[in-house]
Image (spheres, rainbow, N blue to C red):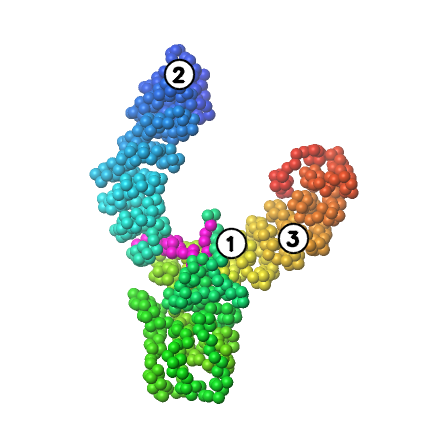
Amino acid sequence: MAGIPLYFVDLQDDLDDFGFEDYGPDCESMRISAFLDIPGQDNLTPLARLEKYAFSDNIFNRQIIARGLLDVLRDFSSTEDDFLTVMEIVVRLSEDAEPTVRTELMEQVPQITIFLQESRPQFPRAFSEYLLPVLVRYLTDPNNQVRKASQEALLILLEQDLIDQSDLENKVCPILLELSAPENDDEYKVEAVNIICKMISMLCRQTVEQTLLPRFCDLCSDSKLFQVRKVCAANFGDVCNAVGQEATEKYLIPKFLELCSDSAWGMRKVCAECFMAVSYTTSSEVRRTKLSPLFINLISDPCRWVRQTAFQSLGPFISTFANPSSAGLYVKEDGTLSIRPPTDDVLTDPNAGDIAHCSSSSENPNIFTEANQTSPNSSKKDDSKEYSCNSGQVTSSSTEGDSRRPPNSPSAEGRSSDVFNSFLYWRSPLPDISEELDLLPVAESRQDSDPESESIPVCKSFMASSDIEKVLQSLQGHMDDPDVQAQVQVLSAALRAAELDTITPEETTSTQENIQPSSETPSSVCTQCPSPTHQEQEEPNLTPQSPASEDEPSLPIVSSQEEEISEDENIKVQDVVPQPLLDQYLSMTDPVRAQTVDTEITKHCAYSLPGVALTLGRQNWHFLKDTYETLAADVQWKVRRTLAFSIHELAVILGDKLTAADLVPIFNGFLKDLDEVRIGVLKHLYDFLKLLHADMRREYLYQLQEFLTTDNIRNWRFRYELAEQLILILELYSPKDVYDYLRVIALTLCSDKVSEVRWISFKLIVAILQKFYAHGENELGINFINELIVQFRHSSKWVGRQAFAFICQAVVQEECMPAEQFATHLLPNLLSLASDPVPNVRVLLAKALKQTLLEKAYFTSLGNPHLDAVEKTVQAMQLDRDQDVRFFSTAEPKRHLRSTPLEQSVD
């Protein structure tokens, strides 16, 4: 190192001879090769002088030439001979023994390649013949710094697509395969693996599968070096995405299974991080049968760091099970969540409003399949094969609304008559036998009924025996869970009850003799059939809608035990996500997890909850409802803040009914929370309120004023966000509501101590005026204008009077009210500001008149009675004693309202 200053002094002496006294090794303000153009005492041509310095004994001379190669090519590559001479010098310089020279040269390769492609198309093979061999050779350079520079240059060229596919296959890939060979040095192997993993996503799929994919699979099984396997695992998701689903499932998934079972915990941790990316490129079957059990193993890993990473990736992994066709929602390219519009394929009955009559799959599978693929919200329940169509959306009848309640509960809100049921639509109407029932006892009417009619059930049982047995078998592996044990007991009772439905008529007759007349056998009435009225809400049994009288039972009724069993089945069974994954996700709110896994595990649960809800669909919201309520009451404000920022997206997923029932109470709680939580609600206040019904939305008019109060008075951005949201919220309310509630908030914000809040509030004032006049509420507009005149025009503070001038300017600019109304109610007060003692007020008045008012045709038209007053005011201000007022009163080009520097002068 002691010799470097000597080199610098020697070259500095040479540069001084050419007049470059200020040039040094760190100088970048001049063209580095400029000294080649100045003739010296050597009488050499510039190219000869270039060759002289390129092979000088002075290392710094060679560094300067390597650093200035781009400038050299710009100056000396116009002819083919000069270009070939320069490239030969580059090749000879690449063989320099000094690593710093080689590093400088390699750092210039990407810029030189871009220059040759853009400015020297007459030399198309220059890079391939001269520069690429140098780059490939440097990948095996013994100096680490040179290798790093060559690797960075190679990746830049790949990203810019500057290397031909043939060169990649014939020149780059062979050297990478050689470096990554098992017998090669470990350091070279790790570097080669890193390049291979990044190159895979940049090459064509055919090249990857033929050349790099086999070597990548071998490296994943490298038992010698942990770093090699770790690099492969870290880039596994990108590799899967590059090769596609078929190659992923055939070659990569077996290797991924090995990596997830690696003995090193760091390897398993990296696998957990990239699990979602791998899952996206696999089929649903592989994701469910292979990746799900593998992920369960990572969640149960003995290493805490692995478990922590797995739980963080659990929500994103569950989101890969999402099916937009069944959820009715999809994510746009810009990342926003949208509802899939309904199509005309769903059959609707004009006499039934929004009810769509869809058949079950057993009777007309074509209609159901078509509706299931095109409807906004479609879900299929494999157990009962019962479907309902409500509001044009195909949904499971057992999960409409809140599935934790029976269909005839008060939460059904009168929807029972709109829910499809096979008993109501696909069976022959039952005759009216109310008069016969008045004459005969119930027991006698049962004995005298037609035997043939008894052999045909009125509606299928709520759960077939085979279906219950399938559910029992699926629960055998979770018998250590007390909840599962209780569920198995209930299902066993349901299985015995279902077997009773298969008793022959003769056995039924003999059995009835030993049963009291008041007891009822489990009926064949489907528990999915909701009650047509609310009169039976307090009764534990369900009665199907029929022409018979409601006071006298015309059909056997379902016992409360069977109803409870059916309700449990509706709650516990879902087939969107493997149940063990969902159970692990729901357990993230368990306090034990915070102690054994991660103290912030609930925050990760809250962060991924909208994605999990989107995956399950609104018909399975009851699985997440308790978890969401637990997170909303978490003691950590960061958890509640996360939910507050995403509650509007969750409302889109759930729909208006579930939002009103389950999200609105939590939303109301967030409104009274800490400012750190309230800001999440406030930033998306408009997005949430627009999803509510008008009546419920109107209730928040009384609570909007609470946002003016913050824990810290200096938190002015909170009030700024409130003003921005109010501008959007105006469209959700009537002009009368805006005048009664939002007007007061707007005037309060206009008097804020912070100028930024005031300026955004002035735009809110203009939006309110536009709301009044757009809906023909001229009287409300005039009353509001009078308040503005009193509060701002006659304000004792110059800031208020200046605000009045800005409001008037914005009103004219946005044309939010008729020009005649402005000239009558606002213009006289605006012109009176010409005599204001504060120059800042007069400056803004001059801008308003000259740049906005006189640009409108109404005020400049001949015969306008107000034109004379405006021109006189402008002429008087042109003679103002203040220089700035005179400047803005003269003829100036029009400037945009937003570009005025006035806002900076308010403080």
Q: Is residue 643 magenta?
A: no
According to the picture, the residue beneath numbered tag 2 turns out to be 46
390 vs 868, left or right, is left
Badge nearest the viewer, 2 or 1: 2
- Whichever of callouts 2 and 3 sits on the residue coming sooner in the sequence is 2
- The answer to which image quadrant residue 843 occupies is top right
Taking the spot 28% from the left edge, 49% from the top edge, the residue there is 250
Residue 640 shows up from this direction: no
According to the picture, the residue beneath numbered tag 3 turns out to be 771
Taking the spot 32% from the left edge, 34% from the top edge, the residue there is 166
Indicate the amino acid at tag 1. Answer: Gly
Is residue 381 depicted above or below 779 in this figure? below
Q: Bounds of the magenta span?
A: 303-332
- The answer to which image quadrant residue 40 occupies is top left
Q: Which mark is residue 680?
A: 1
Secondary element under disc 2, as helix, strand or loop, is: helix
Is residue 411 depicted above or below 68 in this figure? below
690 vs 815, left or right, is left
Secondary element under disc 3, as helix, strand or loop, is: helix
- Whichever of callouts 2 and 1 sits on the residue coming sooner in the sequence is 2
- Whichever of callouts 1 and 3 sits on the residue coming sooner in the sequence is 1
Give the crowd class for mark 2: few <14, some 14-19, many >=20 residues within 10 Å.
Answer: some
Residue 551 position in % (x across, y down) = 50, 82
Residue 610 shows up from this direction: yes
317 vs 420, left or right, is left
Given residues 182 and 577, the one toward you in this image is: 577
Indicate the amino acid at tag 3. Answer: Lys
